Amino acid sequence: MNGLALGVMTGTSLDAIDIALVSIKNSKPDKLVGFYSQQIPKIQKKEIQTLLETSQNEIHRAALISNKLSFKISTTINKFLKKIKLNHTQIMIVGVHGQTIRHNPLNGYSIQLCNPSIIAEKTKISVVSDFRSGDIVRGGQGAPLAPVFHKEIASDSAPCAILNIGGIANITLIDHDKRTDLIVTKGFDVGPGNCLSDLWCSHNLGKSYDNLGNWARSGNLNQQLLKLMLKDSFFEKNPPKSTGVDYFNLGWINNLLNTKNVKLNPASVQRTIIELTAITISNTIPDKYKKLFICGGGIKNKFLMERINIKTRRKIFSTSQLGWKPESIESACFAWLATKTLFKQKLELKNITGVKKNGINGSITFV
């Protein structure tokens, strides 16, 4: 299997529509050919965020918002292809993760906003979507799926850990098996990456994110609030486990502040959120894994990187050292995963999602 594939990711932070063009060689991700990012308009972002909590007429609104997002994805794909002077006929497949608004594998579902029929029709490229449902039906968490891609790009770096910090942070632990082949020993969601700090920043400053973590740096760490945060049952669960911004959100922060009547200035809450992320990440990496590669938007938060460096006591690297831009990893992942679906190749997810048997993930909408 050789050719070009597109991957589309909006991510839990809802910052932008990220598109990766990936060269596939012998069924493996060979290299990143191109990357394009289109910011999601603030109004559209807020519309999507209203679906993270229960509200009136949400099924109707979800359908409309999903269609609107899918049209936006379609025009962004076409714009990207025009920019790099490629025709739709040169693309094997496009993988679209969709925007998660509910993730509840225990009750058998995970819902992403995506209308693949719109995207296939408007781009004239067949679309793979709904990557999680098959895994959930087979007894898995449905997420994270990025660890299987992390293994593909780890090269000669094992044993190592690859940390993706999007809205939610996930970790992949990669080692050698008895035959010296690379294996994922574990891959799971750690907890909040950027989601809590972004939401708190937006709520208090009207900004979509804390630039370089400077606002958090200006606050004071509050141990009482940190202890309350760390007591959340999600952090006590053993992998496999997954979560989303429908769980870790503004309501989660406010509930903790109200429960113990913790009164802090907003900057100190932000500082404590950053510490929570750094600690929960550090707690997941065994001593054996000395190399830590980081990707995702969180890598741009300088203060968060400092805290992770201190807490993990490791020198951290960007995935650029592996030949992949940190902002491209997730979208590139779904480009590759889409080709696995197209050619009916099963994914090895037992050590990641906890699936009972490996299977084919994703549904195809043909042009």
Image (cartoon, rainbow, N blue to C red):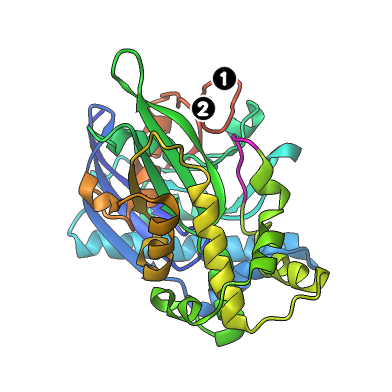
User: Of all residues shown, which one is farthest toward the top?
Assistant: 179
User: Of all residues shown, which one is farthest toward the left?
Assistant: 85
Task: Measuring from the top left, give residue 235's x and y in whole percent.
Answer: 64, 47
Q: Main secondary structure of the magenta part?
A: loop
Task: Measuring from the top left, give residue 318's x and y in whole percent.
Answer: 28, 54
Q: Is residue 101 above or below residue 334?
A: below
Task: Measuring from the top left, give residue 346's x and y in whole percent.
Answer: 45, 24
Chain part drawn in magenta: 238-243
Q: Is residue 353 visible?
A: yes
248 and 219: which is toward the camera? 219
The image's mark for residue 357 is 1
- Secondary structure beneath dot 2 equals loop
Relative to 300, is 62 on the left or the right?
right
Q: Closer to the camera: disc 2 or disc 1?
A: 2
The quarter in which the C terminus is drawn is top left
Q: Is residue 9 above or below residue 23?
A: below
Residue in the picture at 30% in, 51% down: 315
Provide the residue designation for mark 2.
Answer: 351
4 and 193: which is toward the camera? 193
- Classify 10 Å Cα crowding around label 2: few (below 14), some (14-19), many (20 and above): some
Mark count: 2
Which picture quadrant has residue 333?
top left
Residue in the picture at 60% in, 84% down: 204
Which picture quadrant has residue 24?
top left
Residue in the picture at 47% in, 58% down: 166
- Residue 242: say if magenta: yes
